Amino acid sequence: MNHEHFLQTAVRLARENVQKGLGGPFGAIVVKDGKVIGSGQNRVTLNNDPTAHAEVQAIREACRHLGSFQLEGCTIYSSCEPCPMCIGAIYWARPEEVYFACTKEDAAKANFDDVFIYQELALPLEQRTIAMKKFTLPDEFTPFQAWMDSGRKIEY
């Protein structure tokens, strides 16, 4: 597989996204068997969607293409090291590997600094900047119990 070619494609998508004024400087593709099956560019501001990162967009398109929520046998190429949200999406999608060009430190130089998210995740809930509070309900576990008892569940 020509990793340099595919990574250059992701970087080109990122650059074009900025040049066209469509969003931030991020691009990503998903490749399976040497073919691009999903691509994405940052659309956070265009769509008013904080989850519209390039990697997430590419994963969504690739999963639709495959008709699956898993990216088995796929490789993701991203113009930049994925942020914490995208890392979560990548792990849920389960591709074989991820290649990226710029690092999170490079992104921070351009004011895309994810360090605070990593720091927040390490804090106990009560110390986080955004209040996250556990509230106990008598039937709070019933959705999980229904899942465990279901004969129709699809594991993921």
Image (cartoon, rainbow, N blue to C red):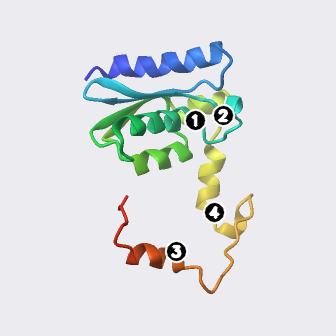
Q: Residue at x 35, y 46 (%)?
A: 70
Q: Residue 53 got which mark?
A: 1
Q: In the picture, residue 151 is in which quadrant?
A: bottom left
Question: Is the residue under label 2 in contact with that under label 1 (CB below 8 Å)?
Answer: yes
- In-image side of 4 versus 88 (left or right): left
Q: Earlier in the sequence, mark 3 or mark 2?
A: 2
Mark 3 → mark 1, Cα distance in angstroms? 30 Å
Q: From the image, tell me which residue sits under label 4.
A: 123
Which mark, residue 44? 2
The crowding category of the residue bearing disc 4, from other C-alpha atoms within 10 Å (few below 14, some 14 to 19, many at least 20), is: few
Disc 3 or disc 2, which is closer to the eye? 3
Badge 3 amino acid: Pro
Dot 3 surroundings within 10 Å: few (below 14), some, or many (20 or more)?
Answer: few
Q: Nearer the viewer, mark 2 or mark 4?
A: 2
Residue 83, percent across and down? 55, 41
Q: Mark 1 or 2 closer to N-term?
A: 2
Q: Is residue 142 above or below residue 13?
A: below
| Above or below 120: residue 81 | above
Figure quadrant of the C terminus: bottom left
**Badge 1: how crowded within 10 Å, few (<14), some, or many (20+)?**
many
- 3D distance between C-alphas at marks 3 and 2: 32 Å
Kind of residue sitting beneath label 4: Leu
Cα–Cα gap, marks 4 and 3? 27 Å
